[in-house]
């Protein structure tokens, strides 16, 4: 399951209370928390903590920040800074008496390149619950290079046209290239799971897309194409449309599974208008022939090989 696959084993460089530095010896004490390399700091966020506060530096797990946005604002470009977001019990069916009920509830903009945002929920299949901070909002808008997001359950309370992640550009000099989204769950009440605009070299894998109202993964209509994406090992369960990326080039879509109405137009994969795409080894809940040609579209944009329909593997692109 997605969230349970999040790798999280930060090295322990020093705990000052147990292993204090030597007085007067430079470099033997650590005043900025644990690190992941020579530069990277770890910033903790926990809205349900007894005393969260955004006026801290967030590097002490006993004094976490209250919001993801404040933590992003403290990150430094290309320093591999990592934001760790604590788990919460926000879900439709959790016991009313459960503690830690407050979800992440923010519309966050990531404009710092080279950072990682982790939902820390190793016991969960779905991840740390995250809802938009505004009605119809977007949980994460990314317009910076080399951002990694994992371990979240992006959701909405219902019918508010919300979006999980948008990777875009700021119309000047910042793009969402090199984005990795993995080990996340995108829930039923979202209109869109992930939207891409002018975002190259995106890697989306081991995610679960459950019944999005419009599309699970799409390029934004009217925007610049988002090419060279890797979309693999994801589970698409009854979104209105799963992968909708016409006009995009050089995508590799493989080893995904699609469940949904096989008679809906472009319900599974639509790459019509692009070029040099490769689609292989996907499981499609449709039959060869009419259903395959209806649920998928891509007559001329690339190679389709060994995609598995109910009654056998495909041998050609859909028409």
Image (cartoon, rainbow, N blue to C red):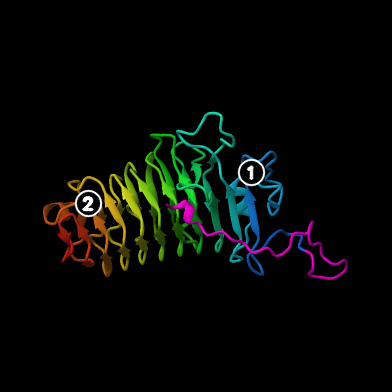
Residue drawn at 40 percent across, 64 percent down: 200
Mark 1 neighbour density, 10 Å: few (under 14) some (14–19) many (20 or more): many
| Residue 111 in view here | no
Residue drawn at 42 percent across, 45 percent down: 163
6 in relation to 214, above or below: below
266 in relation to 52, above or below: below
- Residue 2 lies within the magenta run: yes
| Residue 37 in view here | yes
Asked whether, in this view, residue 178 is left or right of residue 276, the answer is right
Asked whether 71 or 7 is in front, the reply is: 7
Residue bearing the label numbered 1: 66
Asked whether 93 or 47 is in front, the reply is: 93
Q: What stretch is highlighted in magenta?
A: 1-29
Q: Give the Cα separation between the discs numbered 2 and 1.
A: 43 Å
Query: At which x and y percent is residue 125?
Result: 45, 48
Q: Which of marks 2 and 1 is nearer the N terminus?
A: 1
Residue bearing the label numbered 2: 285
Residue drawn at 64 percent across, 51 percent down: 44
Asked whether 14 or 166 is in front, the reply is: 14
Furthest-right residue in this view = 24
Q: What element carries label 2?
A: loop
Q: Is mark 1 on a helix, strand or loop?
A: loop
Furthest-top residue in this view = 96
């Amino acid at each position: 399951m997605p969230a349970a696959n999040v790798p999280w084993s930060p090295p322990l460089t020093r705990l000052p209370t147990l292993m204090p530095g030597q007085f007067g010896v430079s470099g033997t004490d650590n005043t900025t928390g644990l690190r992941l390399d020579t530069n990277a700091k770890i910033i903790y966020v926990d809205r349900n903590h007894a005393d969260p506060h955004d006026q801290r530096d967030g590097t002490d797990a006993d004094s976490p920040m209250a919001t993801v946005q404040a933590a992003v604002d403290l990150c430094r470009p290309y320093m591999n800074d990592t934001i760790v977001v604590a788990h919460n019990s926000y879900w439709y069916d959790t016991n009313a008496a459960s503690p830690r009920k407050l979800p992440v509830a923010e519309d966050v903009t990531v404009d710092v390149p080279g950072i990682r945002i982790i939902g820390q929920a190793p016991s969960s299949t779905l991840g740390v619950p995250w809802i938009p901070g505004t009605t119809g909002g977007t949980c994460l808008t990314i317009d910076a290079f080399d951002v990694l997001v994992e371990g979240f359950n992006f959701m909405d309370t219902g019918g508010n046209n919300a979006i999980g992640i948008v990777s875009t550009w700021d119309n000047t000099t910042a793009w969402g290239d090199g984005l990795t989204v993995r080990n996340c769950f995108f829930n039923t009440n979202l209109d869109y799971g992930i939207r891409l605009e002018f975002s190259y070299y995106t890697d989306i894998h081991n995610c679960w897309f459950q019944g999005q109202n419009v599309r699970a993964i799409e390029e934004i209509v009217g925007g610049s194409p988002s090419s060279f994406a890797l979309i693999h090992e994801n589970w698409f369960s009854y979104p209105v449309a799963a992968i909708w990326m016409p006009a995009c080039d050089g995508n590799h879509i493989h080893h995904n599974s699609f469940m949904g109405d096989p008679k809906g137009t472009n319900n599974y994969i639509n790459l019509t208008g692009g070029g040099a795409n490769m689609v292989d080894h996907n499981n499609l809940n449709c039959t060869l022939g009419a259903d395959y040609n209806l649920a998928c579209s891509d007559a001329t944009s690339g190679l389709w090989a060994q995609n598995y329909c109910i009654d056998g593997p495909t041998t050609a692109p859909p028409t």
